[in-house]
Image (cartoon, helix red, strand yellow):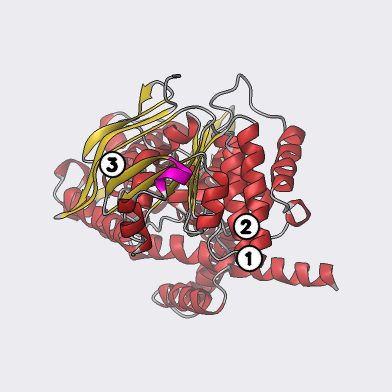
Amino acid sequence: MTAPLLHVNGVTKRFGGFTALDRVELAITPGERLGLIGPNGSGKSTLVNCICGTLRNDGGNVRFAGETLDGLAAHERTRRGLARSFQLPRPFHSMSLAENVRIPLLYAVPSREAKPLERDELQARCIEVLNMVGLAHKSRRMTRDLTQVEMRKLELARAIAAEPKLLIADEAMAGLSHSEVDEILSLLFKLNEQGITIILIEHIMSAVMRFSTRLAVLVSGKKIADGKSDEVVREPEVVQAYLGQ
Amino acid sequence: MAGAHYLNADYFYYASYIILQYIVLATAWNILGGYCGYVNFGSAAFFAIGAYATVFMSKTLPLPLPLLILIGGAASGIAGLAMGYLALRLRGSFFAIATLALAVVLQTFVVNWDYVGGSRGAYVIRPDNLEVAGFQINYIEYLFGIMMGLGLVSVIAARAIERSRFGYGLATIRDDELAAEACGVPTLRLKLIATTISGAFMGMAGAPFPLYIGYLQPSSAFGLEYALNSIAMPMVGGTTSWAGPLVGALLLGSAQQYVTVTISSAANLLISGIMLIAFVIIAPRGLVGIAEALFRRRDRS
């Protein structure tokens, strides 16, 4: 077995007396497509925040690409190849779409490359990334002109622009129609084929089942199941906790 | 009395100096407040650090004015960095309150520091003339020229920042700090650089002030007008571009000079206060924002 790209090692997070994450273990090998599911409030987003450095975990540690991430700020983790999209889109509202995508190109990518992109290359790359999510025709529009779906696509575009090794898509499809979900899924498949490891956090079970080769289930801050997707969803514990039956 | 002042040839330089000084202050405030979104209520403190650096040096080691400006800028730049370390973990109004507190603390410190005059204040002798390469220059004209230079440098710096990678980084902080971090922007470092540059320019604006006024006391160096005008001028002009503080300072600064002569110096602050409130409520993007909106509309039609 290859060494894991991401290794969440006994991560614990408490908010006051409430334990949001309880010694969570999770390992992801390069190129994997992992679905992370769990009921509302089970700690999925908290886990993402601990992995990405938005929150500091109280116990355990997170290793990424052979390096421990403890004490690294969020931007340093992004620069090492860990990108995320936010559950609620957080666009830079004073900027055009192209400028939104330009930020990771300016700040995340050059930290890994010998020389920064030239002006023309930057612009071309912005359009290229926006084109991947089907927003190239709106590159000069401001984010306030976007629909909810387009906001989610912009979130993904910004994460993609950071050229990550691991992409964490936090409910990128909530509230989307069937065809829109298909669109995003095919985009994620395409990114995965290019070698990007992907964690998909999603409530839409059909989408998760189609996408993931592996499922991990969080309930009340504990991981209760982890394995092949079709096997995990049949485990009685998962059925009871997650589907409420 | 007022009429006599008005006709005096020196008056032009005296009045213009103040307006130019506000261009520097407003531009400096905007680098942190406008580009980065952190409102600083303590501009007067940075201005005073620059001014008192000059008082201190004039008692310790008299130096030519350009050097004093560099020293004042360095001192207030360091103060800006320190304020950044202490206060930048605070967000929104809490940051603003912390900067206000900084001004109060510093003023108390200066009031009790005898070497620079304490609460009595200190005289700084201004020469009548300055000899440069054999030419005699009227000192007030010299001060005017220096402040003109500072105004130019600050506006050019602000414009360069706005269009740079650094400027984009500051804008992401203003828009959404969490998203900025997720995009690889080192938010804390950029904020510290912004507080340092902003503080340094304010200090540079304050450094020639003791020579301009001749007698510096804490209440004039820490005057409310600096804190208020540094906020009101960018707000009126528009905070998202370098042109905003420039337009705001020219407009409000000239209006204040006019009112000082025709009505009273007490009406000064009233103008800034009313304009600030009016623009925050009616046109939060300032005059530059209004102009941009008009041009955009014309483009579309």
Where is residue B109 shown, x and y percent of the image?
Answer: 17, 49
Left or right? Give the position of A180 relative to B100.
right
Q: Nearer the viewer, residue A31 or B63?
A: A31
Q: How many marks?
A: 3
Residue positioned 70% across, 47% down in the render: A130
Residue A177: numbered disc: 1
Residue position marked by numbered label 3 in the rendering: A56
A97 shown above or below A168:
below
Dot 2 or dot 3, earlier in sequence? 3
Q: Nearer the viewer, mark 2 or mark 3?
A: 2
Residue A155 shows in this picture: yes
> Which stretch appears magenta?
A228-232
Q: Is residue B235 above or below residue B186?
A: below
Camera-nearest residue between B203 and A150: A150
- Chain ID of residue with mark 1: A
Camera-nearest label, 1 or 3 = 1
Numbered mark located on residue A181 in the image? 2
Query: Gap between marks 1 and 2, in whole Å?
Result: 6 Å
A215 up-or-down from A4: above or below: below
| Quadrant placement of the C terminus of chain A | bottom left
